């Protein structure tokens, strides 16, 4: 689930980056277009200036010619006013035109035009000078040579070409600009669409991820609830099964006890009967020796007493075993009496109770670490640790001096106690076996019924804890007792 | 033993024939010569007890085992102690059960003495013989 999530967010981040990149590209394109537009606007201005300048020049030229014609016709110098005005403005107009011509072709044309203008102005000046000198006829003749007209036609031709060139330039510029703006526009639209798509995709991805997340969390919650229910169910089942076993053990041990009372009772009766039979045999064998055969004597004196002693020993043992089962089943059912238990003083008390054994065997016993205080059942704790300490003392290795260390520490809600000895050790295959009722491990050279550790485990579990063993054969054993720091008091029914 | 005590009939409700015989033997050894009625189930015992109680015929001492085949000895005890006349008859619960709650329940229901049958025969016969002693000193009310 987490992997799908990271893939999704990875894809989302990629989309976001792509969208950002697209936006940057669109911005750069817009700036570029703006720059280009400024350039084109300048170029257009130049073309416009060229066109307008050309027109102004031709107008000036025409004004000059008009003034000359009027003067020649009327000889009235008043008609020379347009000529003079044109003469004054033409150099400025020409200069403007020159600066407006950016292309080489245009510059060439402007230069040619400027020459033509000079020729025209020279022709006009000549005719006016002749007229002023009173040589009207010569002046008119000069006009009639068509030289002025030709020059003017030439000027007009050049002007037309210049205007056409300016127009063409404008057309090219406008077309290029249009194309550029169209390109940028297309790019902007495409980019925007892409950004929108990416954004949409991102949103969708996030939404889907969110949805999946929600679904997953709902599933987990559902699972959790199911799990809790299952755990509760299982716990209840286990508790019931455990209760049943306890009841079973209890009933069985009681029902086994009843016949045992009979066996032991009647064995005692037999024994009592045997006593009088033996007395009788003694009397008879003294008074009538032939009546008592060696067989009869042996039966009365040895066989029957032996059989009875075996029966008695077996029933005694059976009684102990049944009592052990009964005790175990009772420990499992006993209601707890919870109080604050100072484990250090509890352990000291236990050690004091086995002090003479410790001293006799020369055992070095130590309490180590921060031994936690528990909120638990004192009696049960005493039984657990006195059993473990008894065992540690009981199964020391006679080949080396005994050493027993009891340590404690806190592990979150639990207290962990280690009872470590350097005794004979336990074979790993017997780790489970030693906790079973009536089972023992190793050389059977110590008295015992195999009850202690079964009892200890039942008690530890009764407190909600657990006990494990680890050991190296011939080197020592460690019992690890894990108990809740606070045992809850469940009321047993 | 006083004459009054001798008139007391001992009703022994015990399903185990062996136990019954051992109790009987030990009572005899203790010198108890009272009439001993043995019932091996609760139904029979109750029938006898209720009739006896109704007739006010004789004083009773009831020896009750808790593990009976047809009903729990606790039920028998409850019925005896619920009976207007029978309730005064001393009841000695003599059983294998030594469960604390069971013992408390019996006392709560009005049992007079609770004795656990010890598996050890010496203790067993000792306990039964002391019953004889008990019988000789108690003032058994007339039912």
Image (cartoon, rainbow, N blue to C red):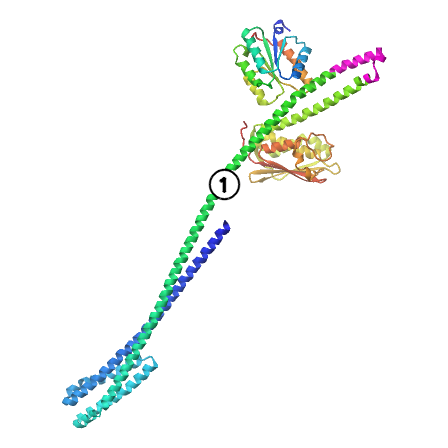
Residue located 27% across and 78% down the image: A51
Residue B55, picture quadrant:
top right
Query: Vertically, is A213 above or below A166?
Result: above
Q: Which residues are magenta?
A: A272-296
Closer to us: A294 or A38: A294
Closer to us: A372 or A480: A480
Residue marked by disc 1: A224
**Residue A183: % across, % down:** 37, 67
**Residue A417: % across, % down:** 62, 37
Task: Name the residue at the right extreme.
Answer: A290
Question: Does the magenta portion include A288?
Answer: yes
Closer to us: A298 or A42: A298
Residue located 84% across and 11% down the image: A288
* Helix, strand or loop: magenta stretch: helix
Residue A366, picture quadrant:
top right
**Residue A176: % across, % down:** 34, 72
């Amino acid at each position: 689930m987490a992997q799908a999530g990271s893939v999704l967010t990875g894809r989302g981040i990629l989309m976001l980056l792509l969208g950002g990149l697209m936006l940057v590209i669109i911005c750069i394109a817009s700036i570029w277009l703006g720059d280009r537009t400024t350039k084109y606007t300048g170029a257009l201005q130049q073309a416009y200036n060229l066109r307008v300048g050309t027109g102004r020049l031709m107008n000036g030229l025409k004004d000059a010619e008009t003034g000359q014609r009027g003067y020649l016709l009327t000889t009235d110098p008043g008609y020379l006013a347009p000529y003079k005005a044109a003469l004054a403005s033409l150099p400025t107009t020409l200069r403007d035109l020159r600066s407006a011509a950016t292309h080489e072709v245009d510059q060439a044309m402007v230069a040619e035009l400027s020459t033509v203008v000079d020729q025209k102005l020279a022709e006009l000046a000549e005719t006016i000078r002749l007229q002023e000198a009173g040589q009207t006829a010569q002046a008119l003749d000069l006009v009639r040579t068509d030289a002025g007209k030709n020059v003017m036609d030439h000027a007009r031709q050049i002007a037309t070409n210049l205007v056409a060139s300016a127009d063409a330039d404008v057309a090219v510029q406008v077309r290029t600009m249009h194309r550029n703006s169209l390109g940028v526009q297309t790019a902007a639209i495409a980019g925007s669409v892409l950004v929108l798509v990416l954004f949409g995709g991102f949103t969708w991805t996030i939404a889907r991820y969110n949805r999946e997340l929600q679904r997953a969390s709902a599933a987990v919650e559902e699972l959790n609830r199911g799990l809790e229910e299952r755990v509760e169910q299982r716990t209840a089942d286990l508790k019931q099964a455990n209760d049943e076993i306890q009841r079973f053990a209890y009933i069985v041990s009681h029902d086994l006890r009843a016949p045992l009372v009979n066996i032991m009772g009647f064995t005692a009766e037999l024994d009592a009967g045997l006593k009088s039979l033996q007395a009788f045999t003694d009397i008879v064998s003294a008074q009538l020796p032939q009546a008592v055969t060696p067989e009869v004597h042996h039966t009365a004196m040895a066989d029957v007493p032996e059989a009875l002693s075996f029966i008695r020993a077996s029933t005694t043992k059976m009684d102990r075993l049944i009592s052990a089962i009964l005790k175990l089943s009772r420990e499992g059912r006993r209601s707890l009496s919870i109080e604050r238990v100072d484990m250090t003083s509890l352990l000291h008390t236990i050690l004091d109770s086995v002090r003479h054994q410790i001293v006799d065997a020369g055992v070095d016993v130590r309490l180590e670490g921060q031994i936690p205080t528990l909120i638990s059942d004192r009696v049960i704790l005493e039984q657990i640790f006195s059993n473990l300490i008894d065992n540690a003392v009981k199964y020391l290795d006679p080949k080396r001096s005994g050493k027993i260390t009891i340590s404690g520490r806190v592990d979150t809600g639990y207290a962990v106690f280690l009872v470590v000895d350097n005794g004979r050790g336990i074979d790993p295959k017997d780790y489970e076996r030693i906790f079973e009722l009536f089972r023992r491990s190793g050389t059977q050279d110590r008295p015992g019924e195999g009850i202690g550790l079964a009892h200890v485990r039942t008690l530890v579990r009764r407190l909600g804890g657990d006990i494990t063993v680890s050991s190296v054969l011939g080197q020592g054993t460690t019992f690890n007792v894990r108990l809740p720091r606070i045992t809850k008091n469940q009321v047993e029914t | 033993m006083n004459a009054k005590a001798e008139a007391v009939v001992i009703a022994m409700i015990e399903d185990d024939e062996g136990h019954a015989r051992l109790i009987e033997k030990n009572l005899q050894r203790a010198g108890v010569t009272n009439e001993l009625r043995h019932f091996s189930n609760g139904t029979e015992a109750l029938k006898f007890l209720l009739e006896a109680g109704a007739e006010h015929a004789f004083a009773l001492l009831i020896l009750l085992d808790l593990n009976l085949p047809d009903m729990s000895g606790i039920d028998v005890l409850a019925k005896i102690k619920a009976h207007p006349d029978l309730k005064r008859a001393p009841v000695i619960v003599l059983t294998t059960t030594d469960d604390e709650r069971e013992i408390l329940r019996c006392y709560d229901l009005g049992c007079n003495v609770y004795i656990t049958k010890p598996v050890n025969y010496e203790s067993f016969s000792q306990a039964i013989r002391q019953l004889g002693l008990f019988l000789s000193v108690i003032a058994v009310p007339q039912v």
